[in-house]
C-alpha cells in the first residue's frame, strides 16, 4: 500500500467516524401528537350537498378541469355525484376519497402522506376501502363533520382545490 493510498484510507475512516459520531449526537425530533379530529355531527342534507356541489363545480369550471365531484354523508354514503366530462374511473376514485375523508375524519392526503413516509405509515394498505390519495376533505359545519367531498380527474393537488371550494361553501354558512 502506497503512502497516498494509506492517507486516503485514513481520511475515509476518520470521516466515517466523525459522521457516525455526529449522527449519534443528533436526536430525532419528537413527533407531535396528531391533532384531534372534529367530531361527527348530523349528516349532511341534500340542500347542503347541493350548495357544496355548486361551489365545487364553479371552481372546476373556472379552471377548465374535467373532474368528478362526489359528496358523502358522515357515514360515507353517497349523497351527490357530478361528472364533468372526466374519465369514468374518476367516479370510484372521487367517491373513495370522500368516504376515506369521512371515515378517518381528516383529508385523504394525510393517508397519502403516511404512505409516502413508509414505515408504520404502510399499515394503511391493510385497511379495506381506504383511498390514500389527495383530493378528499371532510365537510365541517359548526365544528362537526357532516360529510365529505372527494374529487378526481386532474392532478391530486388540483382535485383538492375543487374539494376545498365545496367544503368552504358550507363552512362559511
Image (tube, rainbow, N blue to C red):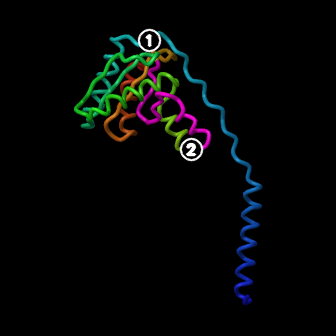
Vertical side of 168 occupied by 65: above or below: below
Write down the region rendered in magenta.
118-140
Q: Residue furthest bottom?
A: 2
CA gap, disc 2 to disc 1? 33 Å
> Residue sitting at 33 percent across and 11 percent down?
47
In the picture of the structure, the residue carrying the numbered disc 1 is 43
Q: Position of residue 154 (x, y in %)?
A: 32, 39
Q: Is residue 138 above or below residue 156?
A: above
Front of the two marks 2 and 1: 2
Q: Quadrant of residue 83?
A: top left
Q: Is residue 139 magenta?
A: yes
Query: What is the number of callouts on the image?
Result: 2
The answer to whether residue 78 is above or below residue 22 is above
Q: Secondary structure at mark 2?
A: helix
Q: Which residue is mark 2?
A: 117
Checking the image for residue 132, the label placed there is none
* Residue occupying the point 49% across, 38% down: 112
The residue located at (43%, 22%) in the rendering is 148
Amino acid at each position: 500500500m502506497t503512502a497516498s493510498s494509506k492517507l486516503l484510507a485514513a481520511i475515509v475512516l476518520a470521516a466515517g467516524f466523525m459522521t457516525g459520531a455526529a449522527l449519534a449526537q443528533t436526536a430525532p425530533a419528537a413527533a407531535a401528537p396528531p391533532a384531534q379530529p372534529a367530531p361527527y355531527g348530523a349528516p349532511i342534507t341534500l340542500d347542503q350537498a347541493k350548495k357544496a356541489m355548486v361551489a365545487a363545480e364553479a371552481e372546476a369550471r373556472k379552471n377548465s378541469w374535467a373532474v368528478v365531484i362526489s359528496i358523502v354523508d358522515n357515514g360515507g354514503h353517497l349523497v351527490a355525484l357530478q361528472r364533468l366530462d372526466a374519465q369514468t374511473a374518476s367516479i370510484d376514485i372521487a367517491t373513495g376519497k370522500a368516504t376515506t375523508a369521512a371515515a378517518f375524519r381528516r383529508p385523504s392526503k394525510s393517508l397519502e402522506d403516511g404512505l409516502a413516509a413508509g414505515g408504520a405509515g404502510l399499515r394503511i394498505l391493510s385497511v379495506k376501502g381506504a383511498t390514500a390519495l389527495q383530493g378528499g376533505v371532510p365537510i365541517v359545519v359548526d365544528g362537526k363533520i357532516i360529510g365529505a367531498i372527494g374529487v378526481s380527474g386532474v392532478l391530486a393537488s388540483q382535485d383538492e382545490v375543487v374539494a376545498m371550494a365545496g367544503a368552504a361553501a358550507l363552512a362559511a354558512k
